[in-house]
Amino acid sequence: MKTSSFMRAAAVALFALAIAGPTAAFADIGDYEFQLVEPTVKKGERVFAVRLLNRTTGKVVPDAVIFAVRLDMAPDDMEGMDTRIAAVPAGEPDVYSFKANFSMTGRWRLSLGAKVQGETGTVDNKLLITALK
């Protein structure tokens, strides 16, 4: 008799969990940010890397889908001066690497847009890269 009551209670609890769905709390999309691995590069065609971090946990976020990338010289009042960017295989885990031609020394603005799996909304960051001689 006791086993039957326990099994019935367990079945009801499992059914309630199935109806309620997953209860895992995700971070707010504003809790994510890109950070440059190195804020400076040398002038010319260079590979640079960024990490996507969850600021709340301090952990690196792998497997984000980066869909918007732009590199221009807006910080030096030359927004029209932009360059092509190509994704390249990363040299280390949890890093997103890109190749671009930094044709001039100065400050370049890197604009990134990404989707994080399991989150709604878009991570949208602008980072500053300085190209040196």
Image (spheres, rainbow, N blue to C red):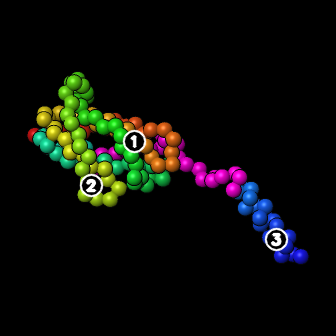
* Quarter location, residue 42: top left
- Residue that numbered label 1 is attached to: 114
Q: Are marks 2 and 1 in contact (CB under 8 Å)?
A: no
Q: Which residues are magenta?
A: 18-38
Answer few, some or many: residues within 10 Å of disc 2's Cα (few below 14, many 20 plus, some between 14 and 19).
Answer: some
Q: Position of residue 106 (x, y in %)?
A: 17, 33
Tell me which label, 2 or 1, sits earlier in the chain. Answer: 2
Is residue 43 shown left or right of residue 51? left
Q: Residue placed at 85% from the left, 70% from the top?
A: 5
Q: Amino acid at mark 3?
A: Phe
Q: Is residue 114 above or below residue 3?
A: above
* Nearer to us: label 2 or label 3: 3
Kindly report the distance in space between the C-alpha atoms of the residues bearing marks 1 and 3. 47 Å
Q: Which residue is mark 3?
A: 6
Residue toward you, 2 or 57: 2
Q: Disc 2 to disc 3, how far (Cα)?
A: 53 Å
Residue 90 is marked as 2
